[in-house]
């Protein structure tokens, strides 16, 4: 943290350092993606930085502005945003730094050796698939055909063919299909609790229309929740309000059910069949999203002595980076160097998934893209999950 403080104090806007007066937030997603791409493509060595809460005034003085704590909570998730829209994957670390009593934000962008970086899919009318930017002095400039061609030619001269790479599921041979067992999601703790409340609401609503006493409601409550749970005389509206909070209330129990008791572990392997080392490799996976297809965005809490406790930061760091959107699941993993003739696991801790019975007999495609410093082109392909 002291290192970043020194950078904030001494840095000025340049090809590898950008100042931004205020947070990006959700409304600034387009600017964030453009700025990350521009810095990743900048012709500089080593790390690159965006310093949020800093600007240079008309007299050339550096001014620092306080950045709100909420910008560091992961909402929005800046890393997930980059994973979804930028290829090859870019490593980003965003953290608060106290400088002269003020909290500023510093994005640290990893050493970018796999240029050019560009938009993987459309974000908006003004930021489309294939768009790429770079830094000219301290400005983001859209790259033209000649600039992109030069980077691709350089990469081709220094690269190896992606035909030497094979990716799949582990086994005696590398498999392209993986069978996944399904489970009954109606037994999710939140689903069970919701069903009980719904029965109680139906009973209470029926009592109101028929003029019955509360005895039926009391007996129903005892049957559903047990005699140890005291009965409370609540209206259907009050019960409905409680039902809307069920997901949040049972979050830990649901995650334990999905990703501990009924999880399927997904591991992928990669084999370098070529004669040369693949340098600085990273893999991204894209799968469809579905209401009955659950992928853990992080390892679930551990149930210990009737309470849920956090895992260690070291355990969480071993789990892949997962970004969830309405229609897709994106997973990324940094692999480093892949030796010639080496078969290696993609994930240190396998991906955890849980699939509901609604998907029985269905299949999902898993699109993969392997990027590396010296690959002539990304190694792309498709695997299948069979439910």
Image: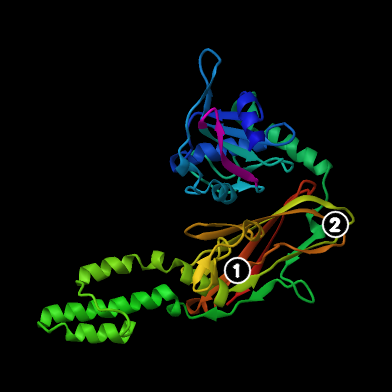
Q: Which residues are magenta?
A: 90-102
Left or right: where does residue 35 sit relative to residue 65?
right
The correct choice, above or below, for 194 with respect to 39 in the image is below
- In the image as oriented, which residue stretches furthest toward the left? 211
On the image, which quarter does residue 343 sit in?
A: bottom right
- Mark 2 Cα within 10 Å, few/some/many (few <14, many 20+)? some
Disc 1 packing (10 Å; few <14; some 14–19; many ≥20): many
Left or right of 107? Residue 211 is left
Q: Residue at x 27, y 79 (%)?
A: 230
Residue 85 location, x and y as percent? 57, 48
Q: Nearer the viewer, mark 1 or mark 2?
A: 1
Q: Main secondary structure of the magenta part?
A: strand
- Kindly identify which residue carries mark 2: 339
Task: Tell me which colouring the rendered structure shows.
Answer: rainbow
* Residue 146 x, y percent position in the rendering: 70, 32
Give the residue displayed 33% in from the left and 84% down from the top: 226
Which residue is drawn at the image coordinates 65% and 29% (left, top)?
6
Q: Residue at x 49, y 74 (%)?
A: 306
Based on the picture, tell me whether residue 317 belongs to the magenta stretch. no
Q: Is residue 48 above or below residue 214?
A: above
| Quarter of the N terminus within the rendering | top right
Judge from the rendering whether residue 78 lies leftward or rightward of residue 371; answer left or right: left
Q: Is residue 51 above or below residue 114?
A: above
Q: On the rendered image, what quadrant is the C terminus found in?
A: bottom right
Label 2, secondary structure: give it: loop
| Circle on res. 352 | 1
Residue furthest to the top: 59
């Amino acid at each position: 943290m002291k290192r970043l403080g020194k950078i904030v104090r001494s840095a000025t806007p340049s090809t590898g350092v950008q100042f931004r007066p205020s947070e990006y937030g959700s409304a600034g997603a387009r600017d964030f993606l453009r700025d990350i791409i521009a810095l990743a493509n900048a012709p500089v060595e080593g790390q690159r930085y965006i310093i949020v809460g800093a600007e240079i005034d008309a007299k050339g003085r550096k001014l620092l502005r306080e950045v709100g704590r909420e910008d560091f909570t992961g909402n929005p998730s800046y890393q997930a945003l980059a994973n979804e829209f930028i290829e090859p994957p870019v490593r980003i670390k965003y953290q608060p730094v106290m400088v002269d009593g003020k909290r500023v934000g510093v994005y640290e962008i990893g050493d970018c050796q796999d240029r050019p970086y560009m938009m993987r899919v459309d974000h908006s009318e003004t930021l489309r698939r294939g768009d790429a930017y770079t830094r000219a002095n301290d400005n983001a400039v859209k790259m033209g055909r000649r600039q992109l061609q030069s980077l691709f030619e350089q990469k081709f001269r220094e690269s190896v063919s992606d035909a030497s790479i094979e990716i799949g599921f582990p086994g005696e041979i590398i498999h392209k299909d993986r069978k996944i067992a399904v489970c009954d999601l109606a037994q999710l703790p939140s689903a069970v609790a919701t069903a009980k409340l719904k029965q109680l609401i139906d009973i209470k609503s029926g009592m109101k229309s028929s003029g019955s006493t509360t005895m039926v409601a009391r007996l129903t409550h005892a049957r559903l929740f047990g005699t140890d749970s005291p009965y409370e005389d609540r209206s259907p509206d009050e019960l409905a309000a409680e039902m809307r909070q069920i997901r949040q209330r049972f979050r830990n129990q649901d995650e334990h059910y999905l990703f501990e008791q009924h999880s399927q572990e997904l591991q992928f392997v990669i084999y370098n069949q070529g004669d040369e080392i693949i340098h600085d490799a990273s893999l991204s996976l894209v799968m469809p999203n579905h209401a009955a297809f659950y992928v853990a965005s992080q390892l679930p809490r551990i149930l210990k002595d009737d309470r849920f406790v956090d895992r260690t930061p070291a355990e969480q760091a071993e789990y892949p980076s997962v970004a969830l959107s309405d229609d897709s699941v994106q997973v990324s993993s940094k692999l480093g160097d892949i030796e010639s003739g080496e078969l290696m696991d993609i994930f240190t801790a396998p991906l955890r998934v849980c699939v509901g019975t609604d998907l029985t007999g269905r299949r999902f495609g898993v699109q993969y893209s392997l990027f590396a410093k010296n690959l002539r082109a990304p190694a792309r392909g498709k695997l299948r999950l069979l439910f």
